[in-house]
Amino acid sequence: MTTWQFFLDNWHHTLDLAGQHAWVVSMAVLIAIFTGVPIGIWITFNRKAAEMVLYIAGIIMTIPSIALFGIMIPLLSVFGYGIGTVPAIVALVLYSQLPIIRNTYAAIRNVDPNIIDAGVGMGMTRMQVLGRVQLPMALSVIFAGVRVAVVMSIGIGAIAAYIGAGGLGHFIFMGINQSYDAMINCGSIAVALMAVATDYVFGFIENRLVSKGLRS
C-alpha cells in the first residue's frame, strides 16, 4: 500500500492524532510561555541569576528527548501520572524554556539604553519603563523564541507517543514495530507538514509584531 492510499484510508484517524499532537504541544508551550517569559524578565535584573538559569536550561536541552521522557516516568509515577500526556507535557515544557527565556532576556537587555533613559526622564518608574517601553520593543524577539519552542515541540512531541501520549508519533512507532512503511511515512510527513505550516504562521505573526517604524 502506498503512503497516499494509506492516508486516504485512514485520514480520519490521522486528523484525530494530529489533534492530539496539537493539544499536547499547545498546552506545553502555553505553560512554557507563562513560566519562561516572567523568568526571562526577572533575570534581566540579576546577572548571576541569568547565568545560572540559562546554564540550567541549556543543560536540559542537551538531554536526549527519549531519555527525558524516560526520566519523567518514574518521577511522575509517584503522583499517578507516569505514562500519558502529563509526562509528555512536562518534558516539552522543560525543552521549551531555553528559547523562550533566552530570547526574553536578550530582547529586553538589548533595548537601547538611551530609550530607557528617555522614559525615566519623562517620570516613568522602572516597572513602567519595562511595561511601556522595553516589553513592546522586545515583543517580536520574544515571540521568535516562542516560535522556535513551538516548532521544536512539534518534532519532539512525535517521540511522546512512546510513553503513551498519542499524537502523530503513534503512526511512526506502530509503523516501525510492524515494518509498515506507509504508516511510518504518513506519520512523518504529517509531523513535518504541521511543523512547516506552524513555522510559517508564527513567522507571519512575528513580522506583524515588529513596529512599522522598525521594519526594514
Image: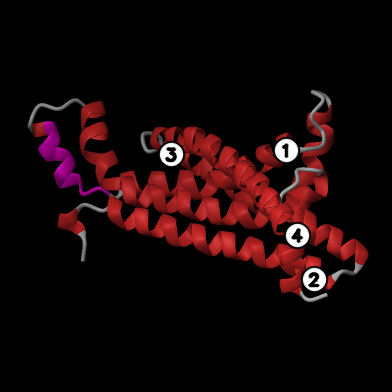
* Mark earlier in primary sequence (3, 2): 3
Q: Residue at 19% of width from left, 25% of height from top?
A: 125
Residue 25 falls left or right of residue 216: right
Residue marked by disc 1: 85
User: Residue 23 in magenta?
Assistant: no
Q: Which residues are magenta?
A: 111-120
* Mark earlier in primary sequence (3, 1): 3
Residue 182 tag number:
2
Instruction: Identify the amino acid type marked 3.
Output: Gly
Badge 3: how crowded within 10 Å, few (<14), some, or many (20+)? many
Instruction: Identify the amino acid type marked 4.
Output: Asn
Residue marked by disc 4: 10
Q: Residue at 26% of width from left, 53% of height from top?
A: 210
* Mark earlier in primary sequence (1, 4): 4
Determine the secondary structure under disc 3. helix
* Mark earlier in primary sequence (2, 4): 4
Looking at the image, do the residues carrying marks 2 and 1 touch, with CB atoms under 8 Å apart?
no
Pick the quarter of the image with the C terminus: bottom left
Q: Give the alpha-carbon distance from disc 3 to disc 2, as whole Å.
A: 43 Å
> Where is residue 22 shown, x and y percent of the image?
60, 47
Residue marked by disc 3: 40
Q: Give the alpha-carbon distance from disc 4 to disc 3, as whole Å.
A: 43 Å
Q: Using the rendered image of the protein, determine whether residue 63 is visible from the camera's viewpoint.
A: no
